[in-house]
Image: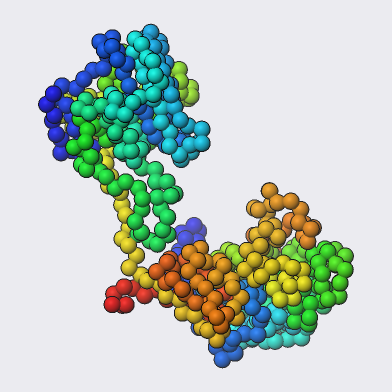
């Protein structure tokens, strides 16, 4: 199959002859891996898919990890369906479709895609976990993936990165982003659209049926349009904005004669960069750790500490 | 109106940036006399910051303080300061404000100064609602005189005069001021310095008697005698032992604190300010006399 490369930021790669996955035609089960972050609706996506397969008379096995992932942790769900499914989990490199509701999660699970034919559909929504931002210094490096669709284009056969969350927000409900991705998923399978809509209407809260069905269409059109090379409505990938590394180096001016060694600044400093020296006077032991949060200055009862931000240029 | 408020907030934020505490201190008196870790220093910073935020001119600022550790706090402020007799700063301040309504009069007083010997002055100052800001630094003990029991010493606390634990019920100063008719009443901890600054700033802005209770620490006398820990432990423990309502949910009743203390602004009423009503009446009477003479 020829691979058509797009320069568009959000359509990463399109196969000239995109596969339509039909469980009737293959002996092996079709594998769909859905990944995301707790609270995004990963399980809902997999339940809809599993229910449709059940309704259409296939054997389905679904296996998921959630539980402790509640609101913010990793959630994934394996859905396998076909005439016969023996194992509930997808082996590495065997997933036909990878649906990622969060960008970094998508990148993390990419190795599960079937090389050459695997379809990667990702929401470019980024949920940066707290542990990716350990340093509190403004502009410090964060642990979140900085890969853009351009960077991972070579690794995938067919791939789409759409800002489903933004599109769903515009349609009226941010939480319908998962249904939008269901719409995207539906283009890779042979199931009738009516069946999808029936199950979605059954699964989502009654008040949100309309918006969910609307975004489902949007997702379908987005993928279909991209495959045909038409310009598609939708938000493109926004690169991660990282503030410039703080060029301000903080120095603490500590008036030793005023300090009474009460220890408040040492114990209250969130970065633990102050110590009491042998004269029981506070001292900035690790100036590079200081983020300039002012806590020591504010809570010093003796007015002995004042924070002086000095720019790097002034230092040099 | 909202635009005005927003503009004011903006100016205040702009003012906050160039706050340099040493501009407001009498540097030749430093280091100050207070014990290591005393919360009064933090309260003083909050007060000076609020003064800076309000853009009050130092020449138009009059600090009146009483006797005690809190009374000495006023000494370090580079403004017109007035160190008065025990318990009477509010009485002095009332006279000062009546004679010089152009001054911003701030009273710094302590729990013993304000509630015990000066309790009478407090309730009457609150009743009149004269435009004074009263900052009560509540460290729950007479610190300077050696740690005697004060009207706000919590139940079961050990002091020099209550060696077996305090058995008197305490005053809730904010409620007292509220009941006496103060127009603005608020309470805050010293550990929440920005919030304390905002509260004092609001109090300074308020036209009328504003009573602000600052929950301060006495580390050397109160803390040591009652084994409340080192200075940082006492500061950190404020949120727990003083139990503002937001921390109240999961805390079991603390033996030293019979009641949970809530923080924030309790009262902001639009009662008439005494000085203004007084001057109106003077104008009226003078007008009448002149009319009669004509």
Q: Considering only vertical position in the picture, is A242 above or below B283? A: above
Quadrant location of the C terminus of chain A in the rendered image: bottom left
Q: Considering only vertical position in the picture, is A175 above or below A244? A: above
Q: Identify the residue at image location x=46%, y=79%.
A: A253
| Relative to A130, B94 lies left or right | right
Let me know if residue B214 appears in the view: no
Residue A204 percent across, percent down from the top left: 45, 23
Q: Nearer the viewer, residue A214 or A1?
A: A1
Q: Nearer the viewer, residue A93 or A34?
A: A93
Location of residue A111 (image quadrant): top left
Give the image's coloring scheme.
Answer: rainbow
Residue B122 percent across, percent down from the top left: 77, 73
How many numbered badges does the structure rendering display?
0
Q: Identify the residue at image location x=74%, y=76%.
A: B221
Q: Identify the residue at image location x=44%, y=71%.
A: A286
Residue B220 percent across, percent down from the top left: 71, 76
Residue B76 percent across, percent down from the top left: 61, 85
Most distant residue in the bottom direction: B28
Location of residue A83 (image quadrant): top left
Q: Identify the residue at image location x=42%, y=46%.
A: A129
Quadrant location of the N terminus of chain A in the rendered image: top left
Let me know if residue A118 appears in the view: yes
| Relative to A281, A4 lies left or right | left
């Amino acid at each position: 199959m020829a691979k058509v490369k797009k320069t568009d930021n959000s359509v990463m790669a399109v196969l000239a002859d995109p596969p339509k996955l039909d469980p009737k035609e293959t002996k092996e089960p079709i594998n769909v891996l859905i990944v995301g972050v707790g609270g995004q609706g990963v399980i809902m996506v997999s339940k809809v898919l599993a229910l449709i397969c059940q309704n259409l008379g296939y054997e389905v096995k679904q296996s998921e990890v959630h539980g402790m992932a509640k609101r913010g942790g990793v959630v994934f769900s394996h859905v396998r369906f076909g005439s016969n499914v023996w194992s509930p989990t997808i082996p590495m490199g065997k997933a036909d479709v990878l649906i990622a509701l969060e960008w970094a999660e998508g990148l993390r699970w990419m190795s599960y895609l079937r090389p050459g034919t695997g379809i990667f559909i990702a929401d470019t929504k980024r949920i940066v976990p707290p542990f990716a931002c350990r340093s509190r210094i403004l502009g410090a490096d964060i642990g979140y993936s900085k890969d853009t669709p351009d960077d991972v284009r070579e690794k995938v056969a067919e791939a789409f990165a759409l800002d489903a969350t933004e599109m769903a927000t515009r349609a009226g409900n941010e939480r319908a982003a998962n249904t939008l991705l269901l719409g995207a998923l539906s283009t890779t399978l042979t199931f009738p659209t009516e069946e999808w809509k029936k199950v979605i209407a059954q699964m989502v809260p009654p008040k949100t049926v309309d918006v969910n069905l609307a975004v489902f269409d949007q997702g379908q059109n987005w993928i279909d349009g991209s495959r045909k090379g038409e310009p598609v409505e939708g938000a493109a990938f926004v690169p991660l904005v990282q503030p410039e590394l703080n060029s301000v180096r903080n120095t603490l001016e500590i008036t030793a004669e005023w300090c009474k060694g009460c220890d408040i600044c040492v114990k209250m400093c969130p970065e633990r960069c102050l110590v009491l020296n042998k004269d029981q006077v506070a001292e900035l032991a690790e100036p590079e750790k200081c983020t300039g949060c002012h806590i020591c200055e504010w809570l010093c009862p003796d007015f002995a500490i004042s924070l002086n931000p000095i720019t790097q240029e002034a230092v040099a | 109106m909202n635009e005005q408020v927003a503009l004011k907030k903006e100016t205040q934020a702009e003012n906050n940036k160039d706050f340099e505490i040493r501009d407001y201190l009498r540097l030749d008196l430093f280091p100050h006399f207070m014990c290591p870790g005393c919360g009064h220093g933090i309260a003083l910073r909050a007060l000076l910051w609020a003064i800076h935020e309000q853009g009050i001119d130092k020449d138009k600022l009059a600090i009146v303080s009483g006797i005690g550790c809190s009374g000495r706090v006023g000494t370090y402020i580079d403004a017109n300061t007035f160190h008065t007799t025990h318990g009477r700063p509010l009485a002095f301040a009332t006279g000062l404000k009546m004679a010089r309504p152009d001054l911003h009069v701030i009273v710094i007083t302590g729990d013993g100064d304000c509630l015990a010997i000066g309790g009478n002055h407090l309730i009457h100052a609150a009743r009149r609602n004269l435009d004074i800001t009263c900052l009560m630094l509540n460290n729950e003990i007479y610190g300077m005189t050696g740690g005697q029991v004060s009207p706000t010493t919590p139940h079961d606390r050990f002091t020099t005069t209550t060696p077996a634990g305090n058995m008197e019920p305490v005053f809730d100063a904010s409620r007292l001021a509220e009941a006496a008719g103060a127009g603005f009443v608020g309470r805050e901890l010293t550990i929440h310095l920005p919030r304390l600054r905002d509260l004092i700033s609001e109090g300074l802005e308020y036209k009328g008697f504003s009573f602000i209770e600052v929950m301060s620490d006495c580390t050397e006398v109160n803390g040591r005698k009652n084994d409340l820990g080192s200075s940082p432990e006492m500061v950190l423990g404020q949120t727990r032992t003083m139990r503002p309502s937001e921390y109240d949910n999961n805390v079991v009743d603390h033996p030293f604190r019979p009641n949970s203390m809530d923080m924030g602004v309790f009262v902001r009423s639009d009662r008439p300010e005494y000085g203004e009503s007084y001057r109106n009446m003077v104008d009226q009477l003078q007008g009448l006399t002149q009319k009669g003479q004509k």
